[in-house]
Image (cartoon, helix red, strand yellow):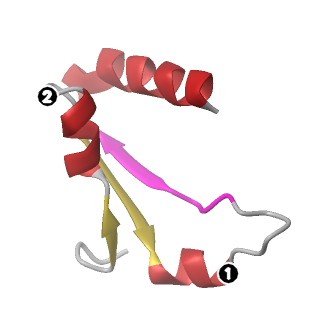
C-alpha cells in the first residue's frame, strides 16, 4: 500500500498514548470492499520493536471499548 493511499490513524493513536509508534492505514480499496454484514476493514500495522508493549495496551483498550 502506498504511504498516502489511505486514512492515517497514527495521529489518533497519539491522542490516546503519546508514546504510540504505530502506523495504521485503511486503504480506499479496503473501504470499498466492505459490506454491511462484514464491516471490518483490513488494517496494516507497522510497529517498531520498542512499541510492542504499546501495541498490546492499545489493542486491549480497543477490545474493551468494543
Q: Position of residue 54 (x, y in %)?
A: 31, 20
Q: Position of residue 5 (x, y in %)?
A: 32, 80
* Magenta stretch in the rendered image: 40-47
Q: Quadrant of residue 52?
A: top left
Name the foreground residue: 20 vs 12: 12
As displayed, is residue 14 above or below residue 37? above
Res. 21 visible in picture: no
Q: Quadrant of residue 18?
A: top left
As displayed, is residue 5 above or below residue 45? below
Spatial distance from mark 2 to mark 1, Cα to Cα?
32 Å
Question: What residue is pinned by disc 2?
Answer: 18
> Which image quarter holds the N terminus?
bottom left
Kindly identify the residue that appears in the image at 33 percent across and 15 percent down.
53
Asked whether 45 falls inside the magenta stretch, the response is yes
Asked whether 41 falls inside the magenta stretch, the response is yes
Q: Position of residue 64 (x, y in %)?
A: 59, 21
Are there few (<14), some (14-19), or many (20+) residues within 10 Å of tag 2? few
Are there few (<14), some (14-19), or many (20+) residues within 10 Å of tag 1? few
Question: What residue is pinned by disc 1?
Answer: 33
Tell me the SS state at disc 1: helix
Q: Position of residue 21 (x, y in %)?
A: 20, 36
**Residue 60 left/right relative to 34:** left
**Residue 42 left/right relative to 51:** right
Q: Quadrant of residue 66?
A: top right
As displayed, is residue 16 above or below residue 13? above
Res. 8 visible in picture: yes
Amino acid at each position: 500500500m502506498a504511504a498516502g493511499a489511505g486514512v492515517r490513524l497514527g495521529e489518533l493513536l497519539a491522542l490516546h498514548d503519546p508514546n504510540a509508534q504505530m502506523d495504521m492505514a485503511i486503504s480506499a480499496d479496503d473501504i470499498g470492499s466492505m459490506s454491511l454484514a462484514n464491516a471490518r476493514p483490513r488494517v496494516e500495522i507497522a510497529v517498531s520493536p520498542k512499541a510492542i508493549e504499546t501495541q498490546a495496551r492499545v489493542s486491549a483498550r480497543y477490545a474493551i471499548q468494543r
